[in-house]
Image: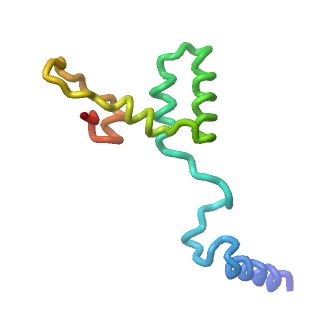
Amino acid sequence: MRLIILIGAIGFMASSGWMGTDPREWDGIPFVEPEDPHAAAAIELRCADEMDAFRDDCEEELEKNFELGVREPEEILRRHCTRFTSDWALTPSSPPNICQEMYGGWIKS
């Protein structure tokens, strides 16, 4: 009897749109935003040169800014991976691994 009630409740929730009608569209726990894949790389790029005492503060501040929407992780990555071309520029160094992975090398302007 309990099994029938449980199956009925699950069927009702699925048909009422509580989690969507197609199980393939379920994202897991409702109302939990997925983590931005650029966030960890942006934090590492921005806070890597800080001393240990200030690194934690830098990471916490950036995470808070990302959550509030004050800054975007990709903004930091694009700024770090952009190189301006010029006739007087020296031979460019090779791009960091993260720039190679995300953009295929330097972003040129």
Q: Nearer the viewer, residue 86 or 20?
A: 86
Where on the picture, by quarter, is residue 59?
A: top right
Q: Residue at x 59, y 62 (%)?
A: 27
Q: Residue at x 86, y 86 (%)?
A: 1
Q: Is residue 35 above or below residue 39?
A: below
Give the x, y percent position of residue 96: 33, 29
Q: Is residue 31 left or right of residue 98?
A: right
Where on the picture, by quarter, is residue 26?
A: bottom right
Q: Is residue 34 above or below residue 52?
A: below
Q: Is residue 66 above or below residue 88?
A: below
Q: Residue furthest left?
A: 87
- Colour approach in the figure: rainbow
Q: Residue furthest right?
A: 1
What is the tally of numbered marks visible in this picture? 0
Q: Quadrant of the C terminus?
A: top left
Give the x, y percent position of residue 18: 70, 72
Give the x, y percent position of residue 69: 58, 41
Q: Residue at x 44, y 36 (%)?
A: 75
Give the x, y percent position of residue 90: 18, 17
Q: Nearer the viewer, residue 70 or 93?
A: 70
Q: Is residue 83 left or right of residue 88?
A: right
Q: Residue at x 55, y 71 (%)?
A: 24
